[in-house]
Amino acid sequence: MAVTAGILPTRCSFDDDIAMITLQMEEFDIFAKQDKGKYRAEEPPDFKVALEASVEELQIHKYYLYDCKFAQSIGAAVHEDETIIAALASEDHQAYEDREMALRLNEDPDLEHPGQATESDLSLLDKWLPVVAETIMANALITTSDDELDQAGPSMTFAERQADLLVKLSQGFTCSVCRETRRCDAMAKVQCEHRYCIDCAKELFIRATNDEELFPPRCCKKPIDATLVRRHMTDDELEAYDIASIEFATIDRTYCSNRQCGKFLPAGLMHVGTKAATCKNCDTCTCCICNNEYHRGSDCPNDPALRATRKLALANGWQTCPGCNVLVQLRTGCNYITCRCKTEFCYVCGIRWKNCHCDVADEGRMIERAEEVVDRDAEAGPPRAERNRRVRLIHSELQENHECEHRGRFQRLLSGGRRGFQCEMCDARHWKYILQCRHCYINVCEDCRRNRI
């Protein structure tokens, strides 16, 4: 029986093909019984060898058809009962979480530790999670198609949908970051419909633990569900990610006063009476008021280094973020500031954005930014009149888009020459291309376009 690639036969077709193969095998059996066997056992004739090979091939194909029929039957049952399966899976997951919560609340030392599960629990969980993940993935592939959302056409039968699913499972998907094709079980689909291979998604989460601007990990301004990546991270990576999530959510942070350590000290480590915290990494005791080494036997003095920094910031016109108290310096552009902690405020007065009456932009800084864009993008020094014309054009557009949200598609700039391109967010240099906003002319790399903006 010939089976066209990518198209599964129906159940009736499977039964007919199995019956046909069975009849062929019975005919071969009748023919074999008529053989008188007048030849040596170790030297059978060619027709005998061909007959045995044909029977073996038919038997293998018959088993294959049985497997396909069984798989299609299971697929149909799952498709028809997917709502019930999802509900049961949700109940099992909720029961597991309730048990974990009950163990955490119970203070009886004779009970097992609430943070640890038994080997049987872990074994059951390890078996349950992949099944649920694969079921959800398969359902998503059946009901959604990235490449065919905009294509109209006749509705497909269940067998056709199953065949289409098998084709997708065999072909895999292309990672939006590294552009390599991976199997679907090695991919993670995020909210914006982009797909990340596990390696790229994991790398983004690891980088986010060390870069607050990347936290929480996101793509196209939409956060990426951590459950898609957590099971692929090591225990040390998970611990670093969880600590970073606490650190970046803390407004008034304390770091270890040992400059060679500098680890973040969560609020839970602070002693309420002494206002000091001991670092678990190097055992250094740090004052949570001034972030210096703990003043044993005396009160915390007014930190002279902090006073000098504030004085320098005041002299240079630097502003303090009202959200996380870090110093911010505005080089060019308007007075609208978005801090790395996501706080939006006015650079002139330091008040949260749109709560003051300050000018939205400093005219001098806007002209400086326009000149910077023109000089950056000019291939060769243009005549003075042409440069001034470009500066006036860019300046007028920046005035209109000073609160640019980078809507629409970025244009890709190629041929950066020997200097290449420099991302204006992470300062990394790139030689292949750079992305430029069509409204405010900011140049950003692919990573910052997806994960920072």
Image (cartoon, grey):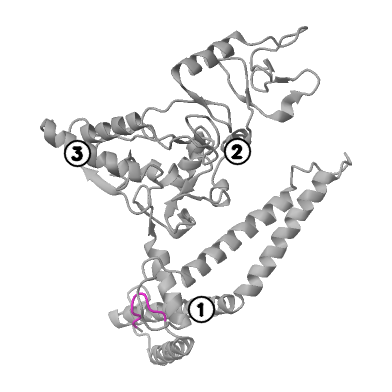
Tag 3: Cα neighbours inside 10 Å, few (<14), some, or many (≥20)? some
Residue 90 belongs to the span the image colors magenta: no
Question: Relative to the observer, which residue lies in front, 386 or 79?
Answer: 386
Q: What mark, if any, has residue 390 been given in the picture?
A: 3
70 relative to 262, above or below: below
Residue at horizontal 28%, vertical 42%? 396
Name the amino acid type tagged 2: Ser
The residue beneath circle 1 is 72
Q: Are marks 2 and 3 in contact (CB under 8 Å)?
A: no
Task: Choose the circle earlier in sequence order: 2 or 3.
Answer: 2
Residue span colored magenta? 2-8
Instruction: Locate residue 303, reporting x and y percent.
Output: 63, 11
Q: Residue 86, how many percent across, how many down? A: 64, 68
The residue that disc 2 covers is 245
- The secondary structure making up most of the magenta span is loop
Within 10 angstroms of label 1, few (less than 14), some, or many (20 or more) residues? some
Amino acid on which disc 1 is placed: Gln
Q: CA distance from mark 3 to mark 1?
A: 65 Å
